[in-house]
Amino acid sequence: MKKLLFVVHTLQIGGAERVLLNILKNINKEKYDITVLALVNDGIYIEELKKIEGVKYKYLFNSYFKKQRENKNSKFYNLSKSIMNFIWKGYLLLLRYFPKEMYKKAIKENYDIEVAFLEGKVSKFVSNSNNVKSKKIAWIHTDINNLPKIKVFKDIEEEKECYNKFDKIVCVSGDVKKRFIERIGRTDNIFVQMNPIDSIDIIERSKEPIEEKLNNKGLVVSTVGRLVKEKGYDRLLEIHKRLIQEGILHTIWFIGDGIERKKLENYVCTNNLKDTVSFVGYTNNPYKYVKNSDVFVCSSRIEGLSSALIEATILEKAIVTTECPGTKEILGENGQSAVIVPNDTEELYKGLKQVLTNFKLRERLNEKIKTRSKLLDINNVMKQIEKILDE
């Protein structure tokens, strides 16, 4: 049995973290002795991970952040925010200047395979492994040119040195691979591997009823993701306001949570959109909301391979999406199964308007997406992932 280590930053809400859970649930436990190490013990997915049979969970640093987020009414909250920022900067400095020492503190046993399941911080940590016998794999989920400007690497040369220490690089799409090669210059042992999505579980859970009362005027548009700038929800609300002013009645359900939520809610209130927007928040079952909507929209500015887009495809929704790395690999090059628009606010407006006002187009999209849905079988994807791990 091979000892397999996955390293992540946290287990906060995110597409890559969700993908990891899918891998852990479906990987062959008779072949691998599996451990997940989080650099920071924080995130909504921790309890779900702990329930997966045959998977051990460890962490390097306990989280001060989670407790303080849950205590926003405390009179010490602003002081706590300052302490959090100080701790965060200290943590990044440790990772920038003392990654080998952090690795030695966290890893006390030898693994056959070490997987850095995220770019940047996690990749730097694993690249400083002192286990010369382990196979090291870096998983790239997004265009690394557009990562947040957190200077975990001293310069581009250190970044290149980091990724050249890995035996294999796994990219979630052809576009992500192309951008990786452009930045790092490495071309050998780079694999393109689509994320595993449990279609059977998604379809079953989508049948659950929606218990809360949500706005549902006109056609319902759903979108799933963290409420962060990268997801483009600010421009989606601008488009929504514009369409409403033009008399195209529809409702948007935002399924997810994040640091931009308050700003988005303020925009809704200021622009009198409360009757046509609902913020569902985080849920472990976004599928029932997508299933009960008429159109799914992905407004992202940046993606590597959108798990939410794959899930909407499995649920056979009419889709409008900006073009990001991986989009055409999910939906097909010919663009017949979804409306794929250039990554621009005006183009997204035109695409969403077209789908909302054209019944025959929605019917055609609903029919064409069924063909794409059948290509996403999780058993085939897991066989490909295990092959990458083993060879």
Image: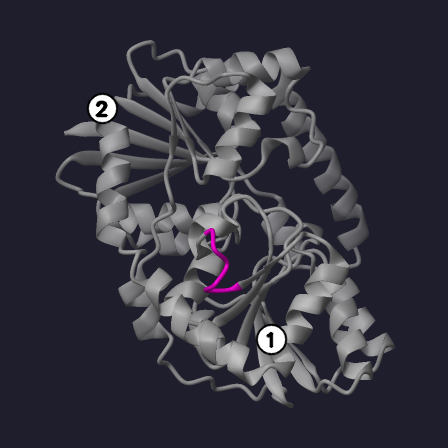
Residue carrying label 1: 355
Work out how far the residue at label 1 is from the one at label 2, CA to CA, in angstroms. 45 Å
Find the magenta span and give its range.
333-338
Q: Residue at x 34, y 13 (%)?
A: 131
Residue 158, given in percent of the width and then of the height, sits at: 60, 13
Judge whether residue 334 is colored magenta.
yes
Which callout, 1 or 2, points at the residue further toward the start of the chain? Answer: 1
Q: Could you tell me the amino acid type at mark 1?
A: Val
Residue type beneath disc 2: Glu
Compared across the picture, whether 234 is left or right of 193 comes to right
Question: The residue tagged with tag 1: helix, strand or loop?
Answer: helix
Residue farthest to the right?
Answer: 270
Residue 311 x %, y %: 42, 62
Query: Is the residue marked by circle 2 packed among few (<14), some (14-19), or many (20+) residues within 10 Å?
Result: few
Front residue of 162/2: it is 162
- Residue 37 seen: yes
| Vertical comparison of 246 with 54: above or below | below
Write down the residue under mark 2. Answer: 391
Residue in front for this viewpoint, 368 or 297: 368
For this view, does 47 lie left or right of residue 306? left
Q: Secondary structure at mark 2?
A: loop
* Quadrant of residue 252 within the rendered picture: bottom right
